[in-house]
Amino acid sequence: MEHSTISTLRIDFVTLFPEMVQSVLDTSIISRARNNKLLETRCINPRDFSDDKHHKIDARPYGGGPGMILMAEPVHQAIRKAATPKSHVIFLSPQGRRLNQEIARDLSLKPHLVLVCGHYEGVDERLRSDFDEEISIGDYVLTGGELPALVLADAVTRLIPGVLKKADAVEKESFSGPLLDFPQYTRPQNWRGKKIPEVLISGNHELIRQWRSQAAETITRLKRPDLMTQKTGRKK
Ligand code: 4G3
């Protein structure tokens, strides 16, 4: 499914580091999307919902072991503050479903995402029922879920209609489809003895289209052969 109507997407971040998240939201394409009212963001800090007088939000694990565990109640309260029945609540975790372009596209169609950023050695297991799903940005461990949440937000934001300029990558994706990008060149034609492919200055747009399509396929087969079988269903 693709976007059909213009509507504002809301993304709420449940994070212990709102300044870190905000600093990224205030930059680049995401901030332009916010200025153009295509995206609305908010940060909610579980620390504000701690019942402890020292605003404590983590504690030692029952059964012993190293590290600290995020307590369920402050995070639960923060999620309740952010979410409505229409919200899609996502926990960023190495245990999650691996993020890809298809998942990003599906998430961009939702009206409201709540991205919950974990920390320390994890969160209290009983919180898992608060999440609609768990997503991972790859098989590695980070100190917190903030960077994964921002990666997800960026991948989703650029898919909102009107966020990218018309000539930008969303359109291009439908051209090169599941393949990697074809090589791009800009001025000068001869850079330190390295020339550009002649076809690109031939003025023959059909020939250029064929060359790019062929180049994209060659590059994909060379660098990511898994994409050939995975997405096109053929091997060659
Ligand atoms: C929960 C996500 C959160 C459990 C989060 C660590 C990597 C990813 C965290 C846990 C994260 C990822 C916070 N690190 N691959 N760190 O998407 O063990």
Image: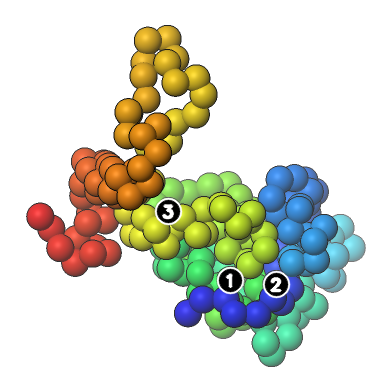
Q: Residues within 10 Å of mark 3 (few under 14, many from 20)?
A: some
Amino acid residing under circle 3? Gly
To which quarter of the image does residue 160 belong? bottom right
Depth check: give the residue in front, 194 or 139: 194
Q: Separation of disc 1 and disc 3 at Cα?
A: 19 Å
* Residue 108, label in figure: 1
Residue hosting label 2: 9
Farthest residue, direction top: 192
Farthest residue, direction right: 53
Q: Is residue 209 above or below residue 41?
A: above
Specify whether residue 76 is in view: no
Where is residue 199? Give x, y as percent: 32, 34
Where is residue 40? Give x, y as percent: 78, 67
Q: Residues within 10 Å of mark 1 (few under 14, many from 20)?
A: many
Residue hosting label 3: 138
Q: Residues within 10 Å of mark 2 (few under 14, many from 20)?
A: many
Q: Is residue 115 above or below residue 128?
A: above
> What residue is shown at x 56% (from left), y 58% (from top)?
155
Decide: marks 2, 1 in contact (CB < 8 A)? yes
> What residue is shown at x 50% (from left), y 59% (from top)?
171
In the image, 186: left or right of 233?
A: right
Is label 1 or label 3 in front? Answer: 1
Earlier-in-chain disc, 1 versus 3: 1
> What residue is shown at x 80% (from left), y 78% (from top)?
81
Q: Separation of disc 2 and disc 1 at Cα?
A: 8 Å
Earlier-in-chain disc, 3 versus 2: 2
Depth check: give the residue in front, 196 or 115: 196
Q: Is mark 3 within 8 Å of ligand 1?
A: yes
The kind of secondary structure element at disc 1 is helix
The kind of secondary structure element at disc 2 is strand
Amino acid residing under circle 2? Leu
Where is residue 181? Give x, y as percent: 38, 46
